[in-house]
Image (cartoon, rainbow, N blue to C red):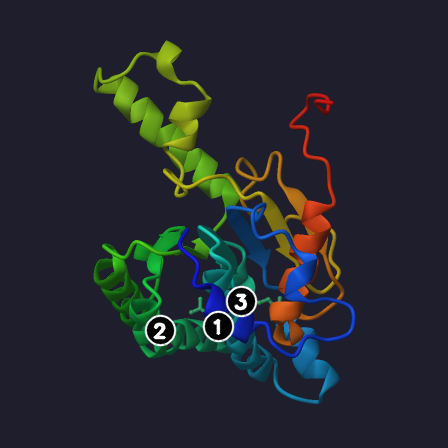
Amino acid sequence: MQRDDEKLVEYFANPPEDISLGDVDLDRLPSHISVIMDGNGRWATRQGKERGEGHVAGIKSLRETITASVRLGIDVLSAYAFSTENWKRPQHEVDLLMHLFATTLVKELPLFHQENVRLVFLGDIEALPAQTREVFEQGLSETANHTGMTLALAVNYGARAELSRAARLLSERVLAGEISPEQIDQDAVSSSLYTAGLPDPALLIRTSGELRLSNFLLWQLAYSEFYVTDTLWPDFSRWELLRAIRSFQGRDRRFGGVIAK
Ligand code: FPP
């Protein structure tokens, strides 16, 4: 991905004591970074605020993570915004999130144009309330030809639902005589997922200290490196992103093999 070095250095000016741009190898960045944005509710509760204020604060962190990733030249950033299980939350919180998604997207579209960001969605967005769905579809079509970073927002996403859907899509193709069962291999499954065409995440970041996947990208995360931080999502910043990348670059990725000496 193209990178503007001048803008990059400016964006990461005034670092905290423990991390700076110089601590990461810009030639070995993860091509796809994925984030489970967790802890908005706890962040709000700890400050005596409504949970909704945590989600509003979380949008700022997402914006900063998008900009930082663009500056670094990351190819794909994916973020888990709403799961197939999140419908179980109180109705007023679901309504607020759906409203926030729509208003945020309208507000951020100029940023996506300015930074050449292509937006895609992971999940069943057909099932979203009309206003949210329409804004999402507008975002999709308006950014479809952008050639910079791909931002994949997981909304109404669940990995088990995604894999069941892939099985359905593939069996329909078999029934239509387009492919034979023998042709259903790993590439065929990958191409039937919402992430078709995107590289698998090299790095998964989860905030708020929880050590679980919560039905996120179960297939795609098979060989990803995990970085879990206690930082709550509204406190996540460009510096925490650099810490995650530094940690990632310190790992040996063997993909089940041995390290070549
Ligand atoms: C998890 O925190 C966060 C969410 C369920 C929502 C995340 C959404 C955003 C940050 C806005 C994204 C914006 C767009 C346009 C997609 P939580 O509520 O589970 O926190 P808790 O675990 O502390 O309760």
- Is any atom of residue 106 visible in this view? yes
Which three-letter amino acid code belongs to the residue tagged 3?
Thr
Q: Which mark is residue 52?
A: none
Quarter occupied by residue 255: top right
Gap in angstroms between the C-alphas marked 1 and 3: 5 Å
**Which sits earlier in the primary sequence, circle 2 or circle 1?**
1
Q: Position of residue 145 (x, y in %)?
A: 23, 55
Residue lying at 46% horizontally and 78% vertically, measured from the top left: 96
Residue position for label 2:
111
Q: Measured along the vertical axis of the image, is residue 133 above or below residue 48? A: above
Along the line of sight, the residue nearer the viewer: 186 or 91: 186
Q: Is residue 166 above or below residue 226?
A: above
Q: Three-letter amino acid code at disc 2?
A: Leu
- Relative to 16, is 201 on the left or the right? left
Question: What's the residue at 27%, 57% (across, down)?
Answer: 146
User: Would residue 103 appear left or right of 202 to someone viewing this image?
Assistant: left
Q: How many residues crowd around disc 1 within 10 Å: few (fewer than 14), some, or many (20 or more)?
A: some
Distance, label 3 to label 2, CA atoms, is: 13 Å
> Residue 179, position in %: x, y?
28, 16
Looking at the image, residue 249 lies above or below residue 134? above
Read off the residue under disc 3. 65
The quarter of the rendered structure image containing the C terminus is top right
Q: Estimate how packed mark 3 is, as few (under 14), some (14 to 19) or many (20 or more) residues with alpha carbons within 10 Å.
A: many
Q: Is residue 258 above or below residue 107?
A: above
Is the Cβ of the residue at disc 1 closer than 8 Å to that at disc 3? Answer: yes
